[in-house]
Image: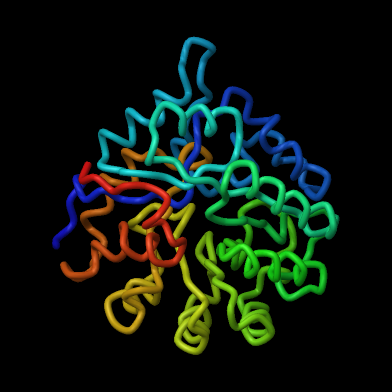
Amino acid sequence: MAFSTGAGAIDLMIGFPFRDKKAVYEYLMPGIKDKGTDDLAMPAGYMFKDVPEEAGDDVDPVEFTFSEMDKWGIAAGLFGVSENSIEARRRHPGRVFFSIEIDPNDISGAVRKIRDTHAEHGLSAVTTFPAGCVPQVPVSDRRYYPIYQTCIDLDIPIISNAGIPGPRVPAECQHVMHFDQVCYDFPELRIVMRHGAEPWEDLAVKLMLKWPGLHYMPSAFAPKYYPKAIIDYANSRGAQKVMYAGYFPAGLTLERIFTEMPNVPLKDDRWSDFLRENAIRTFKLDNVFSFTEA
């Protein structure tokens, strides 16, 4: 199929409009020394134009997000567990699945958080931002290992930032080479690299060729900036390894993403995998929601 906004995409990084961005990103501030960050719309705001506005008190965040999803052909999304996402699943059954963000500095606490949340709500993924932890935790650090094993035990993937972080914090902990050791030590683990993996996107491709459980999503990238190495890989041997994720409301509107999307040089027969099928396979979503064409 060629690209279509009615393709029933699954957005693997989506949320609800923020009412107070400063509060959302407060957890990052202890690790940021750059005072100029205080003047940005969000800690990586220097990288984005037209960052989505905060929502007023008169805006229903659930209905706002779902009206945008309907407008741009998004059938379902991966949402962090929150009051809004729990309410969204009640209102829009079959269109909401859950992730939870963890910081492995509290190893036992993170494992309990994953297990308890999965038992209560059902998780489809764990997410983590190694460079945003305080202190930072490299992807291959021992502190992550109990989290990785927990994901295997629960049969859910982990999504991890890869590459240079947007906030002005050190990057080495997210060097793509860290994933090589993790994939070796945990061959059953499904890992999805998020946020670009730049400037090591060529290495990311090499590692995805090597390791069956390693995947990629171009979250936080406007489609016109999707790395060429990733698109070339998706058009060849990586047809089942690269999957769509946006960045609403943090840095991109769905309007911008799906206005630019038709210009991404994916082959016609790769769009379905990229927009939907790879997410269903990797996150095992076939039993989570009934897919209906948007």
Foreground pick, 162 / 270: 270
Question: With respect to residue 48, does 155 lie above or below?
Answer: below
The residue sitting at 58% across, 79% down in the picture is 188
Q: Position of residue 32 (x, y in %)?
A: 78, 48
The residue sitting at 73% across, 69% down in the picture is 173
Q: Is residue 270 left or right of residue 289?
A: left
Q: Position of residue 254 (x, y in %)?
A: 36, 40
Q: Position of residue 126 (x, y in %)?
A: 62, 56
Question: In the picture, residue 137 is in which quadrant?
Answer: bottom right
Q: Is residue 104 left or right of residue 95?
A: right
Question: In the picture, residue 284 is in which quadrant?
Answer: bottom left
Rendering colour mode: rainbow
The residue sitting at 24% across, 45% down in the picture is 292
The residue sitting at 63% across, 36% down in the picture is 40
Q: Position of residue 114 (x, y in %)?
A: 70, 53
Quadrant that contains the C terminus: top left
Residue 135 in view in this figure:
no
